[in-house]
Image (tube, helix red, strand yellow):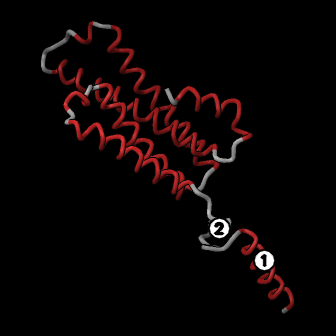
Amino acid sequence: LGILPCVWVVRYRSHRWARIHLVYAFLAGAIGSQQNILLKATSVLTEALFNGDTSAWREPITYVMACSAFGLAACQLSYLNKGLAISETIKYLPVYNACLILCSVFYGALYYQEYHYWQPIGYMLFPAGCRTVMLGVMLLSLEDRGGAKVDSAGGNYGRSTRDAEKHTEKHTEKHTEK
């Protein structure tokens, strides 16, 4: 359900939203988790095939699931790369991994109906765990107040972009005066 609004945001509103990288991370994680579910289902059916049970492979839905797993993998990598292109890797990949794990657990519980085996405490702890993960994702996605950036050469740790520019200007002036 969350994938369709995110695709709409990416398609029509990405130029208006400063945190679009979070949408890309969610999309890559959600699509990746669906791909994992389909790949697991396909591998279980393939194992049954090698054990002599060919009944599932007579149905067209089995082939749709197998092909969809590869199509979803391509979509996942596309959104993952788009997010990496516009965001800092050190912040983007943990958010993506958290979304992938959270969505995988959620979709797995729905698809395999694992919630039927939960104890009453599980119905309280599962949402609490999801909220904790989402809080962590929100904390990871916060910008530094000073605008600290790390350049590709590994410098400027802890400095804001303006401080780094001033430092570079002073350093350049010192060497040009000599």
In this rendering, is residue 85 above or below 103?
below
In the image, which is nearer the foreground, mark 2 or mark 1? 2
Give the image location of residue 15, x and y in percent.
73, 40
Q: Is 113 on the left-hand or right-hand side of 163?
A: left
Q: Residues under labels 2 and 1: Cα distance?
A: 14 Å
> Depth check: 120 or 174 in front?
120
> Depth check: 137 or 63 in front?
137
Name the residue furthest right: 177
SS class of the residue under badge 2? loop
Give the quarter of the figure containing the C terminus. bottom right
Give amino acid for label 1: Lys
Q: Residue at x 27, y 26 (%)?
A: 112
Give the image location of residue 48, x and y in percent.
17, 20
Q: Residue at x 27, y 7 (%)?
A: 58
Give the image location of residue 89, x and y in percent.
55, 55
Give the image location of residue 22, x and y in percent.
57, 45
Q: Which mark is residue 166?
A: 1
Q: Is 13 on the left-hand or right-hand side of 1?
A: right
Give amino acid for label 2: Ala
Residue 163: quadrant of the picture: bottom right
Q: Can residue 119 be spotted in the picture?
A: yes
Q: Residues within 10 Å of mark 2 (few under 14, many from 20)?
A: some
Q: Residue at x 36, y 31 (%)?
A: 107
Residue topped by disc 2? 148
Name the residue furthest left: 51
Q: Can residue 151 be spotted in the picture?
A: no
